[in-house]
Amino acid sequence: NAGVTQTPKFRILKIGQSMTLQCTQDMNHNYMYWYRQDPGMGLKLIYYSVGAGITDKGEVPNGYNVSRSTTEDFPLRLELAAPSQTSVYFCASIHLVGAFFGQGTRLTVV
Amino acid sequence: DQQVKQNSPSLSVQEGRISILNCDYTNSMFDYFLWYKKYPAEGPTFLISISSIKDKNEDGRFTVFLNKSAKHLSLHIVPSQPGDSAVYFCAASFGNEKLTFGTGTRLTIIP
């Protein structure tokens, strides 16, 4: 049972480039989330999904897009990377009252 | 608007003593509270939770207390061990919806 898998673990992007952060869970959870964590800050919710085909904005959605075509996958897309998007990104899936997190993607935009 | 607050960014405790981490919230609709532990370069891992219908939940060395009237919860770790050194996040949810996290407290256990 792999839980929540995020790829890549590290990435350096140039300003204006685009990329997709992948997130897959094998626990058949409906709720999935994308958070970012900036140094000294808590986890801020970017986007979330309550099931396949349903997504909604969190606290800090600007500059990001998501899709949820299957229960397992919840990719996060950055279209025009900006230095303000330098952060560590965590994907999570939630069942009942616990959240399972991926190991994180450290993204640097230069 | 920070709905979940952890006002102490860091805490140092002697090994064997009690560690107390605090968390305050402002949204009275929150009905479930959780604590997560995070080591460097890893995702947060679930530690312990408490429903708003309870005021205490215990799991081994970890106990979470909830004071609804004060909108305050705390995590007690006793006895503290070196492996407990990590960043601890409290989180709150309402109706199984999205989790709102605090900013975290870095706990350092001094041998």
Image (tube, helix red, strand yellow):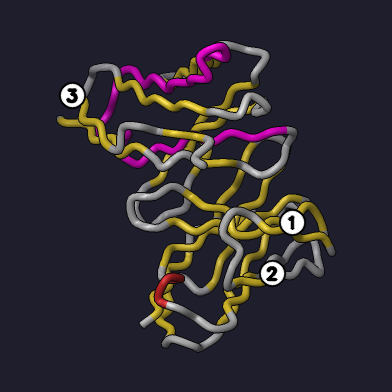
Horizontally, residue A96 falls left or right of residue B38, namely right
Element type where label 3 sits in the image = strand
Residue B87 position in % (x across, y down): 35, 41
Q: How far apart are marks 2 and 3 (CA)?
A: 45 Å
Chain letter of the residue carrying label 3: B
Question: Is residue A3 visible in this depiction of the protein?
Answer: no
Residue A84 percent coordinates (x, y): 42, 71
Residue type at mark 1: give it: Ser
Label 1 sits on residue: A49
Residue at the image position 26 percent from the left and 36 percent from the top: B10
Residue B89 within the magenta-colored segment of the rendering: yes
Q: Is residue A74 above or below residue A30?
A: below
Left or right: where does residue A46 sit relative to residue B80? right
B9, B29: nearer the viewer: B29
| Tag 3 residue | B14
- What x and y, as percent, mark residue B83? 30, 36
In the image, the segment drawn in magenta is: B67-94
Question: Any mark on residue B41, and which?
Answer: none
Q: Quadrant of the C terminus of chain A?
A: bottom left
- How dense is the environment of label 2, judged by Cα within 10 Å: few (below 14), some, or many (20 and up)? many
Tell me the SS state at disc 2.
strand
Q: Residue furthest front?
A: B1
Numbered circle sitting on residue A66: 2
- The answer to whether marks 1 and 2 mark residues whose Cβ atoms lie closer than 8 Å is yes
